[in-house]
Image: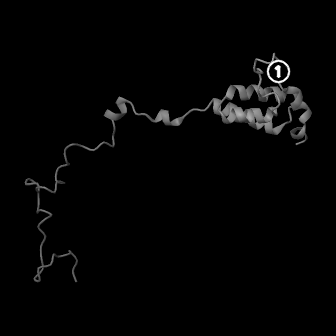
């Protein structure tokens, strides 16, 4: 972490500013700003290319500055980010060929509106009852 506190290298990186006459504004408003803070600020404002450029300049003087490495890696990661939400869109083929789609017609024998008339065997709605009128379970007691 010795490279992290090396402020002399950071001060030499500061971009030279063009001084102008009294009626013009200075071309570099960030001349007195710490370059690491400038790189972090540009990273937060999603100016990723500018953040990478400042970080690369800092790392050319001190390659052991871990804070600058983090800023540069974070900016490169955000720049090459792939949003997975865009890949989730279904095409026409997936919608039409969906195996989990519900059928518009019920399966035979499952409708509750009317019992099926051509079913073989006794209807499941009619169960044998005991002498007391309760349905029989099928188990002998």
In-image side of 8 versus 68 (left or right): right
**Picture quadrant where residue 52 is located:** top right
Q: Position of residue 59 (x, y in %)?
A: 83, 29
Query: Residue 40 at x, y = what percent?
Result: 73, 36
User: Which quadrant would the N terminus be assigned to in this image?
Assistant: top right
Q: Is residue 2 left or right of residue 69?
A: right
Which residue position is annotated with label 1?
17
**Residue, far front:** 23
60 sits left or right of 134 in the view: right
**Could you tell me residue 121's position as x and y percent?**
11, 60
Name the residue: 70% across, 32% down.
42
Q: Is mark 1 on a helix, strand or loop?
A: loop
| Picture layout, residue 12 above or below residue 104 | above
The residue lying at 68 percent from left, 29 percent from top is 48
Q: Which colour scheme is used?
A: one colour
The residue sitting at 54% across, 34% down in the picture is: 83
């Amino acid at each position: 972490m010795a490279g992290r506190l090396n402020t002399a290298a950071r001060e030499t990186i500061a971009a030279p500013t063009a001084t102008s006459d009294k009626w013009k504004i200075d071309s570099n408003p960030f001349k007195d700003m710490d370059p690491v803070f400038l790189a972090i600020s540009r990273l937060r404002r999603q100016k990723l290319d500018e953040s990478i450029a400042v970080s690369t300049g800092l790392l050319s003087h001190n390659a052991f500055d871990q804070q600058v490495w983090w800023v540069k890696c974070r900016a490169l990661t955000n720049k090459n980010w792939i949003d997975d939400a865009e890949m989730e869109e279904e095409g026409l083929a997936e919608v039409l060929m969906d195996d989990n789609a519900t059928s518009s017609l019920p399966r035979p024998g499952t409708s509750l509106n009317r019992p099926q008339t051509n079913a073989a065997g006794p209807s499941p709605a009619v169960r044998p009852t005991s002498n007391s009128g309760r349905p029989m379970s099928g188990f002998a007691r």
